[in-house]
């Protein structure tokens, strides 16, 4: 029985990303036949947790919503994010544990406030979906697009650089009224957080092979669509997320940042130049501690490493820079530069 539960949990966790191949994946993962997998799939279908479309090998599965609600809202500063939460979403979250409610409330209100203040749109779509084991929230608008807005307002080279700045945190086009922290913390609070705007899709997820994903899409999407998902049995709290980036020995505040270095690349290029390093370093003066994440980075050049780990460090001795997830080649280059400083 325990093994059956593990198999069915695996199916439910992977069916969204792999609707047409979840059967094969499950067979490979547990070393069981396709016929055995089909018995588990049929059980989930009979329990009302899955929906199936198509026949035999072309069959596609998806999670069946337990509760699903969608609302179209006229964007107005007179109808603020907390009022929208109370009117449309608070009662839908009552079934979940307090930590899930807290994360849902934080994520929604931060994203909807951005819609009001920055999108320049007229209509917002808010969607709530409760499926087996998780809750999903969508906040979308018909405005100018978040990456486009940040690129123009901050005078950046392109929208990919806007995504890199968003990932660092503390980026805002309205510093008098916003701290620019909402998206940074929301990406860490939810299991999956994604933004689709224009032709770019940006995602941070604990479920995909890489924690960070940036894709170019052929279709151009109008406005901005933000999707947030979290497992209903998650023990994560919004306070834990805040505390993680406040920094030890400081008064409470956003002192640490976690930067996915792979977002500084374009296509298949390698990170070799000082100009690339300067893109990564932009606005580091706003933080006391910087954690560089080299997941997905196969190689860095000496000039790139030197600009960060010698030049910047020497000019900013009060800043602490560390790194994680570097392969042997990247690690060797970093240590060589540091040893020569």
Image (cartoon, helix red, strand yellow):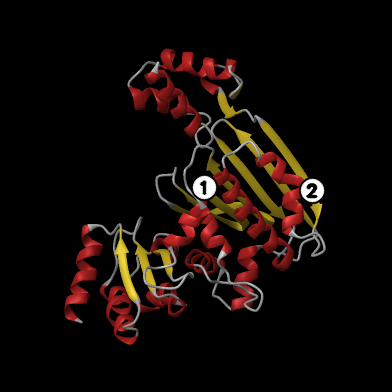
The Cα atoms of the two marked residues, 1 and 2, are separated by: 23 Å
Residue 290 in view, yes or no: yes
Residue 160 vs residue 244: left or right?
right
Residue 322 vs residue 99: left or right?
left
In the image shown, does 89 or 313 lie closer to the viewer? Answer: 89
Q: Position of residue 310 (x, y in %)?
A: 27, 80
Number of residues whose C-alpha sits closer than 10 Å to that of mark 2, classed few (under 14), some (14–19) or many (20 or more): few
Q: Position of residue 133 (x, y in %)?
A: 54, 33
Label 2, on which residue?
72
* Quadrant placement of the N terminus: top left
- Badge 2 marks a residue whose secondary structure is strand
Residue 192 has which mark?
Answer: 1
Identify the residue at image location x=42%, y=60%: 244
For marks 1 and 2, the one nearer the N-term is 2
Identify the residue at image location x=56%, y=26%: 61
Q: Position of residue 232 (x, y in %)?
A: 54, 38
Residue 282 in view, yes or no: no
* Quadrant placement of the C terminus: bottom left
Residue 309 to residue 17: above or below: below
Tally the marks.
2
Residue 64 vs residue 284: left or right?
right
* Cβ atoms under marks 1 and 2 closer than 8 Å: no
Task: Please identify the quarter of the rendering in which residue 157 is found.
Answer: bottom right
Residue 205 to residue 26: above or below: below
Q: Position of residue 73 (x, y in %)?
A: 80, 52
- Badge 1 marks a residue whose secondary structure is strand
């Amino acid at each position: 029985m325990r093994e059956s539960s593990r198999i069915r949990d695996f199916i439910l966790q992977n069916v969204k990303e792999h609707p047409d191949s979840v059967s094969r994946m499950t067979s490979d993962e547990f070393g069981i036949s396709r016929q055995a997998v089909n018995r588990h799939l049929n059980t989930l279908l009979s329990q009302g947790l899955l929906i199936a479309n198509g026949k035999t090998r072309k069959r596609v599965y998806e999670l069946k919503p337990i509760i699903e609600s969608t609302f179209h809202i006229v964007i107005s500063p007179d109808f603020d994010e907390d009022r929208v939460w109370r009117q449309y979403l608070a009662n839908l979250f009552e079934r979940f544990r307090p930590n899930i409610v807290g994360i849902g409330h934080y994520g929604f209100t931060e994203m909807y406030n951005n819609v009001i203040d920055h999108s320049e749109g007229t209509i917002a779509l808010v969607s709530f979906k409760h499926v087996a084991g998780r809750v999903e929230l969508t906040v979308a608008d018909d405005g100018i697009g978040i990456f486009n807005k940040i690129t123009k307002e901050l005078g950046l080279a392109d929208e990919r650089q806007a995504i890199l700045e968003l990932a660092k945190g503390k980026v805002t086009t309205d510093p008098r009224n916003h701290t620019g922290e909402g998206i940074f913390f929301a990406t860490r609070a939810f299991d999956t957080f994604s933004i689709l705007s224009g032709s770019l899709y940006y995602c941070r997820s604990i479920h995909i092979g890489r924690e960070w994903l940036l894709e170019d899409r052929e279709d151009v999407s109008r406005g901005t669509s933000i999707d947030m998902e979290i497992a209903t049995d998650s023990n994560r709290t919004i306070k834990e997320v805040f505390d993680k980036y406040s920094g030890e020995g400081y008064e409470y505040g956003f002192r640490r940042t976690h930067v996915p270095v792979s977002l500084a690349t374009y296509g298949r290029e390698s990170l070799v130049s000082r100009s690339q390093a300067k893109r990564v370093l932009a606005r580091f003066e706003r933080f006391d501690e910087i954690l560089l994440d080299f997941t997905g980075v196969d190689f860095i050049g000496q000039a790139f490493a030197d600009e960060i780990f010698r030049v910047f460090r020497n000019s900013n001795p009060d800043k602490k820079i560390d790194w994680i997830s570097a392969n042997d080649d990247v690690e060797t280059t970093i240590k060589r530069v540091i040893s020569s400083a």
